[in-house]
Image (tube, grey):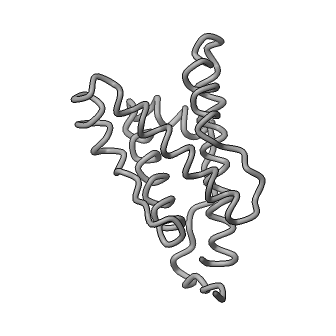
Amino acid sequence: MAPVPVPAGAALRTKRGLLKFVLLGLITFGIYDIWQMSEVGETLNLIATRRDGKRTMHYCLMFFIAGWLTFGIGWLVWNHRLSARIGTEQAARHLPVTVTAATYWLWSVLGTLIIVGPLVYTYKILHAMNDLSADYNMRGI
């Protein structure tokens, strides 16, 4: 299958960063963080759904409803699946695989013991999505 060029006005964002995520999250009382993770899920759906046939649940639906109804289990499952899907897409695009489901469990869950683990996980997710978006912008599908 030949690569499909991305329309000029439809380039995906490649400037996600941890500092902006943390600072704007603090200033907006978490609203920016919710928006950013929603954007990550939607971008992943755009990039990966054609290849794997899956859809990641919208972050707002998970954050405001599913996570609370499942007493937090929904958040664990959503992040596990997101991380696994990012890693699979990185491998399919022949990019270095920097995020997997194990990344989530080791950095975000067990990493809470060293306090900075969830920040490392967020950094890895944001940069993996930057790489996937840049690759998609360059090669299309």
Residue 94, compared with residue 102, is above or below; it is: below
Residue 36, compared with residue 76, is above or below; it is: below
Q: Residue furthest top?
A: 113
Q: Nearer the viewer, residue 46 or 22?
A: 46
Give the residue at x 63% y 22%. 117
Q: Residue furthest bottom?
A: 2
Quarter-wise, where is residue 37 in the image? top left
User: Residue 28 at x, y = what percent?
Assistant: 40, 35
Going by the image, does 129 lie left or right of 31? right
Q: Residue furthest front?
A: 52
Give the residue at x 59% y 52%. 86
Residue 116, compared with residue 141, is above or below; it is: above
User: Residue 72 at x, y = what percent?
Assistant: 34, 25
Q: On the rendered image, what quadrant is the C terminus found in?
A: bottom right
User: Residue 90 at x, y = what percent?
Assistant: 67, 57
Give the residue at x 67% y 48%. 127
Count of numbered circles in the view: 0
Q: On the rendered image, what quadrant is the N terminus found in?
A: bottom right
